[in-house]
């Protein structure tokens, strides 16, 4: 077996503190790895998209059986891809999208930062070719690209969302999705391909191991795909080296003394306690997602975002708000006239089970309501009342009823293309009130 990196002789308290900091640094990355390992590597997984540098389009409405990610969006069928940029950049081509239809291609690096956007808000609905290059690529920049993106990590996720206006609209969504294409730069320019990147050994994801000192093995692997380190993290990475965290280095807990392992596990447990405490009091996900420039070294916020729902959009792209409630008590969400969610594109309200945060199986097969729900009944004054709970709110109200389990549930409101008022916090989601 290969040797571990040399672990510095430090006190138990120092090892514990470093491990706590490192675990909070790593948590979101490991949660994301669980997703992309299944989607791009594990061929036996139902979530497998076909490997790297290829799209898998989900031209369907999500149901409770879809469990690729927590808090799945049921408004915009997904298009998933994972780019391997080690050998060369990838060209992302988009066909023209009808101007009345919203779409977005969101790019997420291994840190879970949103690192680029293509779509209705960011680049418009015209056709175009875009280039995504990894951190170590030094080739020439070709002409003709609408935009060139550079990323910190060699693996980058692409999460596409295409607006769906009801089940009868799915064929139109499929046409838009078919216009998303991925091409290696050499093939796009019709020239010989560069040498292939070395084969990677992907450590199988094990949630139990990830929650112990063995998180270091996962982090070392992931950091090998994020070289060189960001300038803001050079000193931090140096500190992590004291407990064996080195990009690409092996990790074998059997070769570490028991006192150091115990101290690392203490740090991991402290980090987990801190993370749970913050998750328990976080009910609004606005501001949890964004670029490195926005989030910086606020790793705990990054972790909360990953735990509550991976791969949320920047606030300018989508406003997220919500609450936790008890489905055994019927409630109503009342939007006063002129106070409907302020969306340039569209809005929706989706209900999830707790603690797993998946769609709730119900006889109506209704998982969300929004401005495209044709059966919604608006109030006589132009406002809107939505009913939430396990039992029916009664005759005449069921068109506006979002069924819930007879216990805790979570609601997420999504506003695509939010107004300045929403972005600045001047518009807020109304509070859930008892059913009148």
Image (spheres, rainbow, N blue to C red):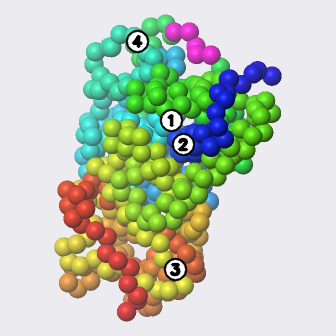
At mark 4, the secondary structure is loop
Using the image, tell me which numbered label, if any, was put on residue 326: 3
Foreground pick, 194 / 411: 411
Using the image, tell me which numbered label, if any, was put on residue 138: 4
Q: Please tell me whether residue 25 is drawn above or below residue 321 in the rendered image.
A: above
At mark 1, the secondary structure is loop
Foreground pick, 307 / 244: 244
Foreground pick, 28 / 117: 28
Foreground pick, 168 / 390: 390
At mark 2, the secondary structure is helix
Which residue is painted at 52% across and 80% down in the image?
Answer: 327
- Mark 1: few/some/many CA within 10 Å (<14, 14-19, 20+): many
Q: Which percent across, then down, holds residue 250?
A: 70, 25
Using residue 183 as the reference point, say whether residue 379 is left or right of it.
Answer: left
Using the image, tell me which numbered label, if any, was put on residue 110: 1
Label 4 – label 2 distance at C-alpha: 33 Å
Q: Earlier in the sequence, mark 2 or mark 3?
A: 2
Q: Earlier in the sequence, mark 4 or mark 1?
A: 1
- Mark 4: few/some/many CA within 10 Å (<14, 14-19, 20+): few
Using residue 335 as the reference point, say whether residue 326 is left or right of it.
Answer: right
Which residue has dot 2 on it? 21
Q: Please tell me whether residue 262 is drawn above or below residue 341 in the rendered image.
A: above
Q: Is residue 161 visible?
A: no
Q: Give the prevailing secondary structure in the magenta stretch.
A: loop
Q: Earlier in the sequence, mark 4 or mark 2?
A: 2
Region in magenta: 194-198
Is the C-beta separation of discs 2 and 1 under 8 Å?
Answer: no
Is the C-beta separation of discs 4 and 1 under 8 Å?
Answer: no
196 is within the stretch colored magenta: yes
Q: Which percent across, then down, holds residue 9?
A: 66, 29
């Amino acid at each position: 077996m290969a040797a571990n990196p040399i672990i510095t002789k430090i006190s138990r308290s120092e090892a514990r503190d470093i491990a706590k900091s490192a675990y909070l640094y790593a948590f979101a990355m490991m949660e994301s790895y669980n997703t992309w390992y299944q989607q791009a590597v594990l061929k036996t997984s139902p979530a497998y998209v076909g490997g790297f540098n290829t799209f898998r389009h989900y031209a369907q409405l999500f149901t409770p059986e879809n469990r690729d990610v927590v808090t799945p969006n049921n408004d915009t069928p997904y298009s998933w891809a994972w780019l391997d940029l080690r050998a060369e950049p990838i060209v992302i081509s988009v066909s023209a999208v009808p101007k009345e239809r919203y779409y977005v291609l969101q790019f997420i690096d291994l840190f879970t930062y949103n690192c680029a956007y293509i779509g209705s808000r960011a680049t418009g609905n015209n056709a175009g070719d875009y280039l995504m290059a990894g951190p170590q690529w030094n080739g020439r920049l070709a002409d003709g690209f609408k935009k060139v993106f550079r990323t910190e990590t060699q693996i980058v996720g692409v999460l596409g969302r295409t607006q769906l206006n009801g089940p009868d609209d799915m064929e139109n969504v499929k046409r838009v999705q078919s216009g998303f294409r991925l091409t290696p730069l050499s093939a796009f320019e019709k020239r010989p391909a560069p040498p292939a990147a070395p084969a990677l050994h992907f450590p199988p994801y094990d949630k139990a191991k990830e929650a112990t000192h063995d998180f270091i093995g996962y982090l070392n692997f992931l950091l090998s795909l994020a070289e060189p380190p960001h300038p803001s993290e050079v000193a931090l990475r140096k500190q992590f080296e004291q407990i064996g965290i080195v990009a690409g280095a092996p990790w074998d807990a059997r070769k570490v003394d028991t006192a150091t392992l115990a101290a690392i596990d203490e740090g991991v447990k402290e980090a987990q306690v801190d993370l749970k405490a913050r998750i328990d009091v976080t009910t609004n996900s606005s501001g949890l997602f964004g670029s490195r420039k926005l989030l910086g070294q606020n790793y705990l916020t990054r972790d909360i975002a990953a735990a509550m729902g991976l791969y949320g959009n920047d606030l300018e792209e989508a406003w997220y708000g919500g609450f936790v409630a008890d489905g055994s008590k019927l409630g109503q969400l009342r939007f006063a006239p002129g106070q409907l969610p302020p969306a340039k594109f569209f809005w929706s309200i989706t209900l999830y089970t707790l603690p797993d945060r998946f769609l709730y199986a119900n006889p109506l097969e209704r998982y969300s309501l929004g401005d495209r729900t044709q059966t919604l009944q608006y109030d006589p004054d132009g406002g809107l009342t939505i009913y939430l709970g396990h039992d029916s709110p009664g005759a005449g109200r069921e068109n506006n009823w979002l069924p819930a389990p007879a216990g805790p549930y979570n609601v997420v409101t999504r506003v695509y293309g939010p107004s300045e008022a929403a972005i600045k916090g001047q518009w807020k989601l109304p509070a859930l009130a008892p059913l009148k």
